[in-house]
Amino acid sequence: MLVTGVEWISLTNSRPCAILVSLQWIPSHVNLKYNDIADSLAKEGTTIPQAYVEPLNYLELYSRRKAFVNISWRHPPAHSWYRSEDPGVTIHFKGDRKYQTALARLTSGHIKTLRFSRGDTKFNICTNWNMTEATPQHLLGCVALVYDDLLKRPDFVLEVMKANHLMDLI
């Protein structure tokens, strides 16, 4: 009896477990236009001699991983939002703790509305435009500022954000 996939599922659910079943593969891809060419190329590829590579021992694996980690620590990723000379730039800002935190969030890009969903970063919708995401770049562009203003004139940036009612998003 020839059975398709859907029929197979219904048969296995309705039959007792002690039935002998033999399956037969019927190739349905024979004599297709480019399948014969692909098969011949695959057969030729299996005849090519493979270069022998010795397996790595523990010390070699450890030293390679350690070198990779050292390089990544010496050269941290160059994010466009982290161009300050030292990590404590917002600490030098003389203001309330609330404004220091807002400045640090805006500088790093980790604002209140940032959330992660299935590996993607998501932002809430901007309250001024109601169409675009409220990313740090958008919030600065919304009030005609640039990132360099954040580093050079942080007090001015915070005043502009307060005047435009954007502090709730930062």
Image (cartoon, helix red, strand yellow):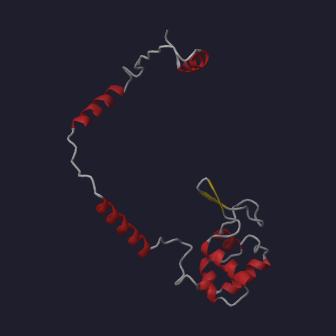
Q: Quadrant of residue 102?
A: bottom right
The answer to whether 110 appears left or right of 82 in the picture is right
Depicted 73 relative to depicted 4: above or below: below
Q: Position of residue 57 (x, y in %)?
A: 28, 57
Depicted 147 relative to depicted 48: above or below: below
Depicted 98 relative to depicted 16: above or below: below
- For the point 41% across and 76% down, which residue is it? 74
Q: Nearer the viewer, residue 51 or 69?
A: 69
- For the point 26% across and 52% down, which residue is it? 55
Q: Position of residue 144 (x, y in %)?
A: 68, 76
Q: How many marks?
A: 0
Residue at the farthest top position: 1
Depicted 97 relative to depicted 25: above or below: below
Q: Position of residue 115 (x, y in %)?
A: 66, 61
Q: Nearer the viewer, residue 72 or 134?
A: 72
Q: Position of residue 96 (x, y in %)?
A: 73, 86
- For the point 21% across and 39% down, which residue is it? 48
Q: Quadrant of residue 124?
A: bottom right
Residue at the farthest front position: 18
